[in-house]
Amino acid sequence: MKKYASKRGFTLIELLVVISVILIASSIIFVGGNGGKGASLSASSRIVSGITKGARGQAILKNARTRLIIYTDSSANLDEEKYLRYFGIIYEDNDNLGQWIAATQGTFLPEGIYFDSTLSSSKGWPTSATMNLEYPRNIAKPEGNGDEFYYYEFNSNGTMSSDFVNDWLVIRAGTLKPNASGSLELEFDDEEESIISALILRRSGTTTPVHEPADIL
């Protein structure tokens, strides 16, 4: 059986995202008063901003619907390392609508920083925005199988899909712990509570960063 992945080349957007992540990792700014977690949040904010711009650029480049995806699978196959901190980009195959192709191999946020789906949804992000997909794959695959991901969607012209206009993407420091049902959920101590950042995704596809905890919580 052929192994398609061995023939896979990098897309322009993927190369740009990888370069951005390397630059971010080599220039992490220490945030006074918050120690390592503050530095991780600073790096994570830049990573998420770069991935969001990459998703928008991919939509324009491919003239296709594109999604920024975040791993949230809580099935028996849960990968705790990826949970709420593994981000990727996929685009729709215009020749096979409803099927998706990986534009990147995925990027992890620094340890201890996670996507906060609960707080994001309180700011307008639709909690129903989930999909199951085999990711990353460089061939078109329909959604419905594979791991579960949250997503934000861009139109083919780089604008936000109508369901995601002015929605928030919130990341914050926290600790993953099992709840009463055995599922993982984020918990925060007094220090972690204020280590938080967000992006507001505008109709045009651009983003506005928000770093003041009082403006997010």
Image (cartoon, helix red, strand yellow):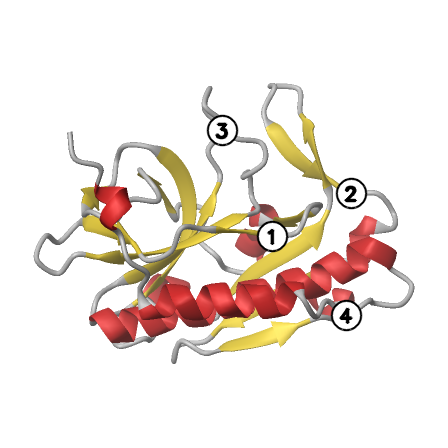
| Disc 4 target residue | 29
Q: Earlier in the sequence, mark 3 or mark 2?
A: 3
Q: What is the distance, in whole Å, between disc 3 and disc 2 at their CAs? A: 20 Å
Q: Which of 29 and 8 is in front in this view?
A: 8
Query: In 3D space, how far apart are the residues under numbered discs 3 and 4 (Cα atoms)?
Result: 33 Å
Three-letter amino acid code at the position of disc 1: Leu
Q: Which of marks 3 and 1 is in front?
A: 1
Circle 4 — which element?
loop
Assess disc 2: are there few (<14), some (14-19) or many (≥20) residues with their C-alpha within 10 Å of its C-alpha: some
Res 55 visible: no
> Label for residue 74?
3
- Up the image or down, 207 lies above or below 120; here it is below
Q: In this view, does 82 lie to the left or right of 106?
A: right
Say which amino acid is labelled 2: Phe
Q: Mark 1 points at which residue?
A: 109
Residue ID for mark 2: 188
Q: Residue 59, percent across and down?
A: 29, 69
Residue 15 circle label: none
Label 4 packing within 10 angstroms: few (<14), some (14-19), many (20+): some
Quarter of the image with the N terminus is: top left
Type of amino acid under label 4: Ile
